[in-house]
Image (spheres, rainbow, N blue to C red):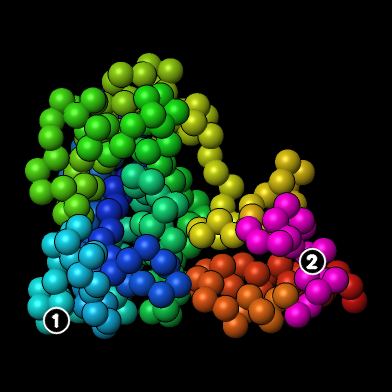
């Protein structure tokens, strides 16, 4: 069994699309495991205040009609934040959509949501490191079950929780707590959740995209301050812009 020293929240999100800068959450499910093994569930449909594209509806089945009377994320933000208070977090493929979009929605709502002092375990990272498969295949492989109602946020979050429990039992080298798991799979050092910036092997923030990929962010901003303006005007996630501004401000202070 997974041994917890603090609660862990398994999160899955369905959205209008996959761009954290422009898309919105339409459903969030959080399954919270307490240290004593108690399980609490929170699932909410959310009004994205924008049309849901038909190709996305075809995937998760959530229509404009289903969410028209639902609260917006801003209206539900404090409730969601409170439910996550004191929790470590686990997702499946955390950096693709769930965490970047969740953090972005909190920023848009004007609600501070800090990842400091939280551990983040990406169940997909364990799976890919150990077996190299997809979510449905992972559920079949580890739990010998088929996900009923796949692409329902609650069903996917529940499957994620079961997979992590099964992984702990299957791979003794993982140990049975988050600290030991992260020692095996590695703990990502996060700058921005869209991963436009990453750390190099010396701990320096570098660009992870575009013409400056691999170059130190501070060096580029000093040489081309207009690049900062271009990014701030562009369709980048607000979380990315926040981190860019922090780096820019820090580099300007060093010049003084």
Residue 10: image x %, image y %?
29, 48
The tag earlier along the polypeptide, 2 or 1, is: 1
Q: Quadrant of the N terminus?
A: top left
Residue 237: image x %, image y %?
50, 71
Q: Is residue 35 above or below residue 151?
A: above
Q: Is residue 145 above or below residue 56?
A: above
Q: Which residue position holds label 1?
A: 68
* Residue 161 belongs to magenta span: no
**Residue appearing at x 42%, y 67% in the figure:** 20
Other-residue count near label 2 (Cα within 10 Å), few / some / many at <14 / 14–19 / ≥20: some
Q: Secondary structure beneath disc 1? A: loop
Q: Which mark is residue 38?
A: none
Q: Which residues are magenta?
A: 209-226
Residue 61: image x %, image y %?
13, 62
* Residue 213: quadrant of the picture: bottom right
Q: Secondary structure beneath disc 2? A: helix
Task: Tally the numbered discs.
Answer: 2
Disc 2 to disc 1, how far (Cα)? 45 Å
* Residue 15: quadrant of the picture: bottom left
Q: Is residue 10 above or below residue 107?
A: above
Q: Which residue position holds label 2?
A: 220
Q: Is residue 201 left or right of residue 129?
A: right
Q: Quadrant of the C terminus?
A: bottom right
Q: Is residue 163 above or below residue 98?
A: above
**Residue 88 can be seen, yes or no:** no
* Residue 216 belongs to magenta span: yes
**Residue appearing at x 79%, y 66% in the figure:** 220
Other-residue count near label 1 (Cα within 10 Å), few / some / many at <14 / 14–19 / ≥20: some
């Amino acid at each position: 069994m997974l041994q917890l020293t603090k609660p862990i929240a398994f999160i899955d999100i369905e959205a209008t699309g996959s761009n954290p800068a422009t898309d919105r959450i339409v459903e969030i499910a959080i399954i919270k495991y307490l240290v004593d093994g108690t399980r609490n569930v929170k699932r909410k449909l959310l009004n994205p205040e924008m049309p849901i594209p038909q190709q996305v509806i075809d995937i998760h089945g959530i229509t404009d009609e289903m969410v028209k009377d639902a609260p917006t994320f801003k209206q539900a933000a404090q409730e969601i934040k409170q439910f996550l208070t004191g929790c470590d977090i686990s997702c499946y493929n955390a950096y693709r959509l769930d965490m970047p979009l969740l953090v972005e929605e909190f920023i848009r709502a004007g609600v501070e949501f800090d990842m400091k002092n939280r551990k983040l375990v990406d169940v997909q990272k364990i799976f890919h490191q150990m077996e190299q498969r997809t979510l449905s295949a992972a559920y079949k492989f580890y739990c010998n079950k088929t996900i009923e109602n796949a692409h329902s946020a609650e069903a996917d979050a529940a499957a994620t929780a079961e997979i992590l429990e099964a992984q702990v039992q299957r791979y003794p080298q993982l140990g049975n707590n988050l600290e030991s798991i992260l020692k095996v799979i590695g703990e990502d050092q996060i700058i921005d959740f869209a991963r436009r910036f990453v750390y190099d092997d010396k701990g320096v923030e570098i660009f992870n995209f575009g013409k400056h990929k691999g170059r130190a962010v501070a060096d580029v901003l000093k040489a081309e301050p207009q690049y900062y303006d271009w990014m701030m005007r562009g369709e980048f996630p607000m979380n990315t812009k926040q981190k860019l501004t922090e780096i820019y401000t820090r580099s300007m202070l060093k010049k003084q």
